[in-house]
Amino acid sequence: MRADGLWHPGLLALLTSLGHTDRIVIADAGLPVPPGVPGIDLVWRRGDPPFLPVLRAVLAELVVERAVMAAEAAEPLRAELAGMVAPAPLDRVPHERFKELTRGAAAVVRTGEATPYANVLLIAGVPF
């Protein structure tokens, strides 16, 4: 058993399988999972688990080259995400474009978050 970090076996398997430029989406409970894209549902009730703690746990396990979020997200969320993914850049695109980008993701990880547009697409980097 791991002493610390993520304990969810499916999420760990996903993260360790990612290669450079592969994409993973951490999402609120409402983001649709595109056909053919695996989903990992962590949600067990409205609000649980929250988006930001799940994202923090994923970021502790993943090298991020770039991140993308919906332009419609509220400014406090944008600022929080920018700080969390730094020094990687955080791009903003219209929500419809964001949903298109999820089609190429290795997986969508759904949280119980109920805040509109609380979604981020992470593009895997390399540790060297």
Image: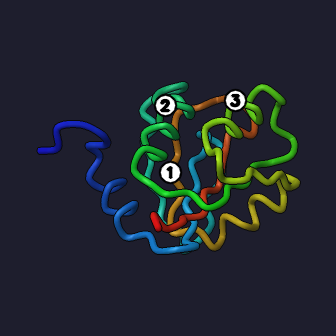
Q: Name the residue under label 3.
A: 115
Report x, y in % for residue 126.
49, 68
Circle 3: residue type: Thr
Residue 33, located in which quarter of the rendered image?
bottom right
Circle 1: residue type: Val
Secondary structure, mark 3, is: loop
Circle 2: residue type: Pro
Identified at 77% across, 58% down, the residue is: 98
Left or right of 98 in this view: 41: left
Check disc 3: other Cα within 10 Å, few if <14, some if 14-19, many if 20+: some
Which one is nearer the viewer's eye here, 82 or 122?
82
What count of labels does the image hold? 3
Q: Is residue 68 above or below residue 126?
A: above
Q: What is the spatial separation of the Cα atoms under label 3 and label 2, in whole angstroms?
A: 14 Å
Identified at 56% across, 34% down, the residue is: 51
**Mark 2 / mark 1, whichever is N-terminal:** 2
Q: Quadrant location of the N terminus?
A: top left
Q: Name the residue under label 2.
A: 53
Q: What is the spatial separation of the Cα atoms under label 2 and label 1, in whole angstroms?
A: 13 Å
Residue 85, located in which quarter of the rendered image?
top right
Which one is nearer the viewer's eye here, 56 or 126?
126
Report x, y in % for residue 13.
31, 62
Secondary structure, mark 1, is: strand
Q: Is residue 53 above or below residue 91?
A: above
Q: How is the image coloured?
A: rainbow
Q: Name the residue under label 1.
A: 109
**Of marks 3 and 2, the one in the foreground:** 2
**Mark 1 / mark 3, whichever is N-terminal:** 1
